[in-house]
Image (cartoon, rainbow, N blue to C red):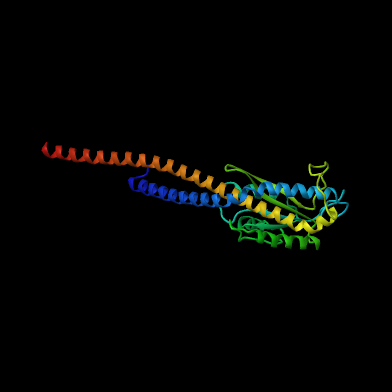
Amino acid sequence: MANLSELKNELRSTKDIGKITGAMELVATAKLKKISKRLGNIQNYLTEVYEIFNYIISHTSDSNFMKRDGQVLSKTLWIVIGSNLGLCGGYNSSVLKLLKKHVGQQDLVFPIGTKVYNFAKFNNYNIYRSLTNIDVDFSNEQSRELSIWLLENYLKKEFDSIKIIYTKFVNNVTFDATVMNMLPIEVPKEKNDNDDLTLEPDASTVLQTSVTMYLNTILFGTIIESQVSEQASRRLAMESATKNGKEIADKLSILYNRKRQESITQEISEIVGGANAQNG
């Protein structure tokens, strides 16, 4: 059984940790509120752009950006979005699980975030490029520069396909690690609801001139969505840690007070016993 001094130190340490996790919860909440404002229209826009480009591809006879029947893709560039910091629950582990499942020996990895980069480096994945300075202020201009770079290297045939692993934000307590195909775009088997669109001068020209916008939209949207998921996951983790810490502190406080009461009672008994012995 721990003595009073040990219990007091443990209680103090538990409360101090609770203050830290509580502060981290507040920071994550503030960041989540800030970046959630950017997410509102991004998800719908991302879906619309993806559908429109599938429509364009379905009306294109041949293009570097469409997947041909029977085409074998031997080298994929995997853009994997994680976090720079830890303490965000299972956010990174879910992303890394998909990385291990899908990325082959011939594939290239583009880690976004320190956690993914460290994992890829430690496990000897082929790191093509990395980016570890992205935060909640990630801009559309940064995304556009990356998209241009991706397109240039894709056309140089450095890789024959681009896929992205990111975390899809469902709500404040649910986030799903997801794989999305970027290039080449597969021709949809069924016609979509955009058959009233007119493509001028033709679908191939529209595709060639707007593919950078497509890549930019996908990249920017998935990075923002991943960041929202990260902050929401961190807020949940810190909220849970703070709650558990308070429960432990309450139990330690009760135990400490009980031990202290026992110690005081014992001291009083010894004093009374000593006095009685002298009077006897």
The residue located at (40%, 43%) in the rendering is 249
Direction left: furthest residue = 279
Instruction: Give the percent coordinates (x, y) of residue 16.
Output: 41, 50
Instruction: Give the percent coordinates (x, y) of residue 245.
Output: 45, 44
Q: How many numbered discs, if any?
A: 0
Q: Is residue 30 left or right of residue 168?
A: left
Instruction: Give the percent coordinates (x, y) of residue 180.
Output: 72, 49
The residue located at (46%, 42%) in the rendering is 243
Q: Is residue 101 visible?
A: no
Vertical order, 271 against 30 (above or below): above
Q: Nearer the viewer, residue 268 or 236?
A: 236
Q: Is residue 174 left or right of residue 98?
A: left
Q: Is residue 185 visible?
A: yes
Q: Quadrant of the C terminus?
A: top left
Q: Nearer the viewer, residue 168 or 140?
A: 140
Instruction: Give the percent coordinates (x, y) of residue 5.
Output: 34, 48
Vertical order, 60 against 141 (above or below): above
Vertical order, 128 against 34 (above or below): below
Quadrant in the rendering for residue 148: bottom right
The residue located at (38%, 42%) in the rendering is 252
Q: Quadrant of the N terminus?
A: top left
